[in-house]
Amino acid sequence: MKVIVTVVEKITSEAHIDIPDGLNQSTIKQHIVDRYNTGEISTNMNIFQVDFESISAQIVQENSSPKSA
């Protein structure tokens, strides 16, 4: 018997970055998104929490060879 097990986890990562002073909230958000999109932040991300969301299993019927009459 084959069973496919699926585990869903939510991973929370954090990075400590320096941003220029004097930016408003909208500009700070855009600055962070831009740095993430260019890959500058992803290498600094540290996983600090993993939350278990769910687990499920599906039984897979194995193919049986057809019988001839």
Image: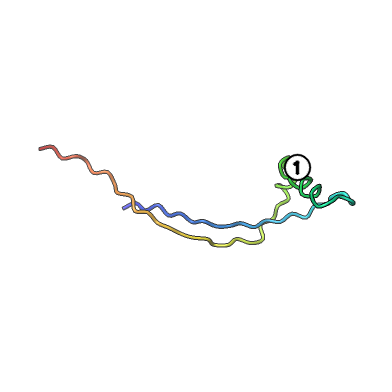
Q: Residue furthest right?
A: 22
Question: In the rendered image, which residue does mark 1 sit on?
Answer: 34
* Scheme by which the image is coloured: rainbow
Report the residue that reaches farthest toward the top.
68
Residue at the image point whose x is 43% and y is 54% from the top: 5
Residue 66 spot, x, y in % from top left: 19, 39
User: What type is the residue that disc 1 sits on?
Assistant: Asp
Q: Residue furthest left?
A: 69
Image quadrant containing the C terminus: top left
Name the residue nearer the viewer: 13 or 31. Answer: 31
- Based on the displayed image, in which of its 4 quarters is residue 9 positioned? bottom right
Element at label 1: helix
Q: Residue at x 76, y 49 (%)?
A: 29
Picture coordinates of residue 43, whole percent (x, y)? 71, 47
Q: Could you classify mark 1 by the number of other residues whose Cα lies within 10 Å: few (under 14), some (14-19), or many (20 or more)?
A: few
Q: Nearer the viewer, residue 34 or 1?
A: 34
Q: Quick check: 49 above or below 22?
A: below
Residue 3 placed where, x, y %?
37, 53
Which residue appears at 71% of the width and 41% of the height? 37
Q: Report whether 31 appears left or right of 2.
A: right
